[in-house]
Image (tube, rainbow, N blue to C red):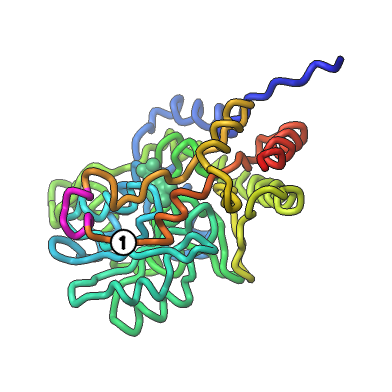
Amino acid sequence: MVERTRFNIPISRPQLGVEEEEAVLAVLRSGQITQGERVAAFEAAFAAYHGAEYAIATSNGTTALSTVIMAHGIGAGDEVIIPSFSFFATASSVSFTGAVPVFADIDPKTFNLSPEAVEAAITPRTAAIMPVHLYGQPADMPALEAIARKHGLILLEDAAQAHGAKIGERSVGTWGTASFSFYATKNMTTTEGGMILTNDAEIARKARIIRNQGMDQQYEHVLMGFNLRMTNLTAAIGLVQLDKLPQWTAKRRENAALYDTALTSVETPYVQPGVTHVYHQYTVRVKPGIDRDVAVRQLNGNGIGVRTYYPKPIHRQPVYAREERYARLDLPETERAVREVFSLPVHPGLSSEELEFIIDEVNALC
Ligand SMILES: *Cc1c(COP(=O)(O)O)cnc(C)c1O
């Protein structure tokens, strides 16, 4: 009898090598450990990679988002339209500035903000629209840009999951002021870290001031700011990771293409024509009659780290749900996605044996 290999396949696996180790050691030995030259170099490289004018590195993706909101002068009483089908930080970063998150429903095919739902959510208090490029697929930026222009709204991007994703030849992060995350599970990491991209010199200037205690020069505090800086230590990791990102993205897309053809028992991801999906997650929908939670438990039991992103919409999180306006909210496609989706490991560290095992086990679901 052949002994069956036992797998233990995590949903993500940070790829860290000797290049990262050497980069960190070089910074430690230099003594220049806080925000400095490595941060500036990382900003320049990240901006160039996406074709954006300015980059501002921050302590994490959540602080990048809040800094963007503040740099645009959005605050108390202003509304920002976002999806509820996202990670909590998409909303908390808005709330932290005093602005009000307004949740709009998603397109059931892409899981991204529905432009029609966004337009319906606009009120006289709306200041901005902030789509999320969920799972690494760009939101419908041309449609959202048209809506923003028509109503005089600011266009922002939560690109925390979409490093290097594109619509045609144009990268995410160049449509509106954008925030990226370098948390350990993202497509590239700096341990913790974030980045703002913008083509607006004044927004870039304000974001730098807010990041550094609101100072425009030493001990002259001109805006309300905070300590939201990145360090040279983590920026050095980011520079190495950015070099490796294209090959990792290619591997993620290769893994996804394999799943697309091999998986028969689930609905595989719909990709909008003309976009480059970078597969932060490979997210499937269960077929009618299949209980998602049972499927996830079965796969987890077999050593496959499938996960549900996200098991609860943000507006139903207790901290929001106790407010009347959120308790009343009905977002049917968000609710359906929350019940029906799960994500498979798609990261570049997967071996062909692991991919084959995942495909066999998922296909055995029905
Ligand atoms: C990860 C993530 C964030 C927050 O980034 P952190 O670096 O963890 O603070 C925000 N929005 C989305 C969609 C994310 O996936």
Residue at the (30%, 58%) spot, across then down? 68
- Relative to 18, does residue 244 appear above or below in the rendering? below
Q: Position of residue 330 (x, y in %)?
A: 31, 61
Q: Residue type at mark 1?
A: Asp
Q: Is residue 297 something that shows in the picture?
A: yes
* Residue closer to the observer: 205 or 111: 111
55 relative to 340 in the view: left or right = left
- Name the quadrant containing residue 143: bottom left
Query: Where residue 192 sits in the image (x, y, percent)?
Result: 40, 37
Q: Quarter holding the N terminus? A: top right
Give x and y (percent) for residue 149.
Answer: 35, 81
Q: In front here: 329 or 119?
A: 329
* Picture mark count: 1
Camera-side residue: 279 or 322?
Answer: 322
Q: Is residue 239 magenta?
A: no
Q: Which residues are magenta?
A: 320-327
Residue lying at the far bottom in this picture: please name it.
150
Residue 194 is at least partly visible in this image: no
> Under tag 1, what secondary structure?
loop
Q: Which one is nearer the viewer's eye here, 113 or 65?
A: 113
- Left-right relation of 184 to 31: right
Q: Circle 1 sits on which residue?
A: 330
Name the quarter where the C terminus is drawn: top right
Where residue 259 sits in the image (x, y, percent)? 71, 48
Task: Write the residue at 41% across / 81% down.
Answer: 146
**Residue ID at (72%, 32%):** 354
